[in-house]
Structure formats: C-alpha cells, structure tokens
Amino acid sequence: MKNQEIEPSETGDKQGTSTHWICTANHGFAPYAQEELRRLFGAVKSTVLIPGEVLRVTLQEEAEQVIEAIAGKPPVFLRHLFHIDWEWRASEQGELAAGIDELVAAAMSDPRLRDAATIAVQPRKSEHSLWSDSTAELKDMLQNRLSELKAEFVVRDADYIVSVFVGKEFIYAGISQPAHNISDWNGGAVRFQREEGQISRAKFKLLEAELTFGIDFSVFREALDIGAAPGGWTSFLLDRGLKVTAVDPAKMHPSLQNAPNLTMLRKNAGEVKFREHQFDLLVCDMSWSPKLTARLVSELLYALVPGGTAIVTVKLLSKKPMALIQEVIDMFQQSRMQVQRAKQLFHNRDEITLYMIKY
C-alpha cells in the first residue's frame, strides 16, 4: 500500500529551497504537529510513515532556519524531528543489504562523526518495515558496522545522533546534534524504569517534566497537590524532600498513610482554604474538564507565592485542542500566571502539561 499523502498547505512557497524531515508526535496527534509546522513555515507537505504518529515532512526552508525557528518557538505537539541527510529506496536501488551498506558508507565518511567523541545511534521502523527484525538488533548491527569510528557509543548526551528510520520502501537517515532534534531520546520517547512499589505511572509525567522543563523540584519548600489520589505525584514530591498537602476526596495509597511530611485533606479542592502564599509549588493532574480545572486552580493561586511554580495537566477533550489550549492559557494569564512552556510530553496521553510561574 502506498504511503498516505496529506495535502500541502497553499500559504506560500520559496523557490529552490526545500528540506525533508522525519517528524514525530504522540499517537493520534501528528496532524496537530503538522499544523504547528504550517503556522511556523507556511507550505507543508507530509507523507504518513506511522499513522497518527510519524511523518516525512517537506518544508520550504533551509535546515538551519527550521532548527532556529523551532528553538525560538518550541512546539506543543511536535515531539521529535530529524533532518534527512540521506535516503534510499529499495525498489530502485536493490535489496535492503545494499541500502545498509550505503548508509554505513555515508556515515563513515561524514566528518562530523569522524571527529565525535560520543555518538548515539537511534533507529526506528514502521510496521511491515524493510527491516524485519527488532530495532534493538538494527541498532546493534549499525553500531558494529560503525565501530571503526573513534567515538564511544552512548544512549544519551552524545556529541552527535545518527537517526535512522526504516519504512516499507525507504531508509531515511540524518546526523544531528541532540539539541536540533527537540529531544535527544530516540523518537522523543522518554523511557523510565518502573520502580518497585511505585504508586502509578503518573510519576513519569513529573520525571519527564523535570527533564523537559529543567525544573529542580528539590529546591521547593512546600507543595500543594490538587486532585492528588492515589498519590503518584505526591510520592514523587515527598521523595524530593518537600512538605506536601494533598487534596482529594478519594483515598490515597496506603504506603503514604504515615508519611511524616504529608498532610492529607479528604475534600474537594473547592472546599479547602490555605494561608496566603503558603506554597511555592502547586501541581494538579486531574481528569476534569480543562476549563473547570483551570478555574479551580486559579481560585487557589492566592496560596502560591509570587515567583512560585505550577505544573498542571490539561485534558484535551475538545476536537479543536489548539484553540482549547490557548483558551486555558488565557485563563491562567488572567490569574497572573506566566506560561513558560506548554508541551505534550511522551507520558501525556490525551493531554498536555503546562509549566507556569506566578508573577
């Protein structure tokens, strides 16, 4: 079956300039990532490689301009991208082995890799890919083939990343600095090891927020966790050494019952009162209407110190999530909150995470 084509926008074209990219979003949100690119660059043409998640995108801009524009206005839904430096098509150029040989030769001859101290090899594949084995086996094979390079192979924090995507007919590859890919995790898929006794996977959201937004949670003194049950975020903050007030009418996990720095209030958030400026951190991860959540959090912001931080997830229940996000951001800005970043993290599902500071 041919790759599905998404119609290009007709908002402009720059003659003689085009670059090609592999772009990734959380599953089901690739159309919104494409819309973000259209708003930044105008004309966008995309081919679906993994439905709802991975696109091959053509932009009418030089690679350096694309990287600079995305760094200047970080996207909400676009999770990861890499510039395609090299591509190979099976039907025209032989069997897969020939494509791998050409890929390795191109990488070995690239001066960036010859001078690199550390390299990360990040392969991915589509369903019914030319590469039938696992991506782990593809990574091992590529690293073995590239072993004549002087660099050490690492998972993250590399000097350069070799990104490879093997589809049904094509192999795409690019060499880039980690900062140019939005995320230096393979495909932007941030992986954490589940710990013994971990209350819920919700903890991963704060772990990822810590990395993505550059937040050091250990510098905070006292946190308010709204809609805390069963306690995944509360547990994370206690582990970072904070005093935590957890608000939720539902029961918290039994492991938290005797936590010395925890105050649990079995109430709805609209029923509680706190001292003014009691907290320097407010977090909220509730499965409520996004506007209702924004209103509820806003009503409790008196308890957050000026300069305090808020981390709030926004559920995307609307068919127009980009408009909804802007409306929620406007509500928080009217409550003296400055939005530092809005991002759909890898561990978000049908939601985004807002990182805000009170002024």
Image (cartoon, rainbow, N blue to C red):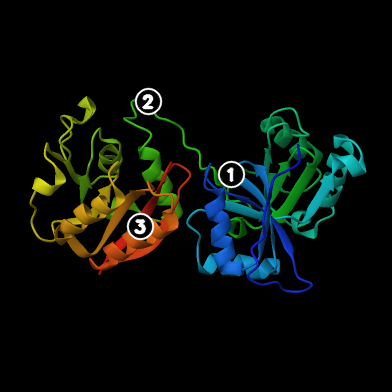
Between the residue at mark 2 and the residue at mark 1, the CA separation in whole angstroms equals 31 Å
Residue beneath disc 3: 355
Residue 146: quadrant of the picture:
top right
Q: Earlier in the sequence, mark 1 or mark 3?
A: 1
Q: Evaluate if marks 2 and 1 touch, with contact meaning CB atoms under 8 Å apart.
A: no
Q: Quadrant of the C terminus?
A: bottom left
Q: Earlier in the sequence, mark 2 or mark 1?
A: 1
- Going from N to C along the chain, the mark reached first, 2 or 3, is 2
In the image, residue 166 above or below residue 59: above
Q: Which mark is residue 53?
A: 1
Query: Which image quarter holds the N terminus?
Result: top right
Mark 3 residue type: Tyr
Residue 180 position within the rendered picture, expressed as x and y whole percent measured from the top left: 61, 60
Give the residue pinned by disc 2: 196
Q: Is residue 159 in sight in this rendering?
A: no
Q: Residues within 10 Å of mark 2 (few under 14, many from 20)?
A: few
Q: Nearer the viewer, residue 17 or 84?
A: 17
**Residue ID at (19%, 44%):** 244
Q: CA distance from mark 1 to mark 3?
A: 24 Å
Element on which disc 1 rests = loop
**Residue 171 point in image, percent of width and height:** 78, 44
Q: How far is disc 2 from disc 3 in space, using C-alphas? A: 28 Å
Looking at the picture, how far across and down is residue 3, in whole percent? 73, 43
* Discs 1, 3 touching: Cβ within 8 Å: no
Amino acid carrying label 1: it is Glu
For numbered disc 2, what is the local secondary structure? loop
